[in-house]
Image (tube, rainbow, N blue to C red):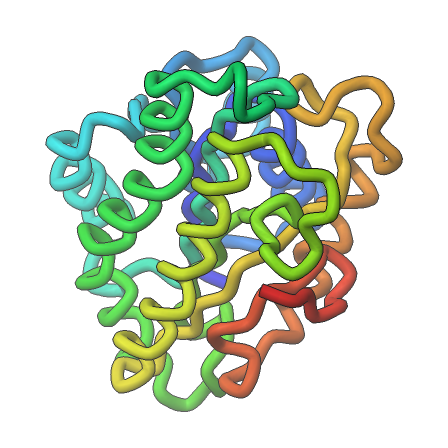
Amino acid sequence: MKSVLITGANRGLGLGMVKYLTKHNKAENIFATCRTTSEELQNIAQAHKTLHIFNLDVTNSENYVNLSSLISKVMGSQGLNLLINNAGVTTKFTKLSLVKTEQLLENLTVNTIAPIMLTKALVPLLKQAAELNQDKPVSANRAAVINMSSILGSIAQNDQGGFYPYRCSKAALNAATKSMSIDLKKDQILVASMHPGWVKTDMGGKNATLDVETSVSGIFNTVEKLREPDSGKFLQYDGTELPW
């Protein structure tokens, strides 16, 4: 891939993705966005000139146009091959009797609205990449959007209840993924939702079953294999298809 954009790249899963891509030379240009740059992310950028860090609060859609311009300055007319909407927030186990309006709104804003609006803003760059790479199959090497979702967004597998803000926002993101896959099919842009597994991050907690490296390795191994028939699917990091 010539270019990858990862939101929420200063820690956790997003930082793990940056580490994986730089370590394995998987992309010629990596665009990492975050509200506040972590020292670890800065250190990686100093060692890898292919990594570009851009300040971005995903809740402020007015900055999306500027982000698009910054990418274009680096990529010229080559566009953007892969957009990974990774930035997210969660709340603790939230029962119906305890859920608050502000929790619902925050989760929906960051986990659903931001990925939709950022994708909308970057579609012209994705189209550029898709058109320029017509010799390649529909894939991340051409143009693709990966929305980082969660098994908690699966309605079919919800057997615990609770988690209202997070579940609702991720179920809505899955719905957006399906619509994106249909709307962008004509442009040869692949779109999929992906569950990273229960990962040991600040969000996942210390009891999680997967380390970041295992999850991220699985995610990119799966992403590299995705083709046109996979567009619109909800997949686990290891490629297993999940129920909506």
Circle count: 0
Residue at 34% from the left image edge and 45% from the top image edge: 115
Residue at 49% from the left image edge and 40% from the top image edge: 86
Residue farthest toward the top in the current orientation of the protein: 39
| Residue 176: percent from left, percent from top | 36, 59
| Residue 59: percent from left, percent from top | 26, 27
- From this view, report whether residue 113 is shown above or below residue 244: above
The quadrant of the image that shows the C terminus is: bottom right
Question: Which corner quadrant of the image does residue 114 belong to?
Answer: top left
- From this view, report whether residue 111 is shown above or below residue 131: above
Question: Which corner quadrant of the image does residue 68 belong to?
Answer: top left
Work out whether residue 52 can be spotted.
no
Left or right? Give the position of 34 relative to 156.
left
Residue at 53% from the left image edge and 18% from the top image edge: 97
Residue farthest toward the bottom in the current orientation of the protein: 135
| Residue 13: percent from left, percent from top | 63, 33
Work out whether residue 107 can be spotted.
yes
Q: Nearer the viewer, residue 171 or 3?
A: 171
Q: Nearer the viewer, residue 84 or 173?
A: 173
Question: Which corner quadrant of the image does residue 219 belong to?
Answer: bottom right
Residue farthest toward the front in the current orientation of the protein: 97
Residue at 83% from the left image edge and 33% from the top image edge: 211
Left or right? Give the position of 149 relative to 66.
right
- From this view, report whether residue 6 is shown above or below residue 4: above
| Residue 30: percent from left, percent from top | 46, 43
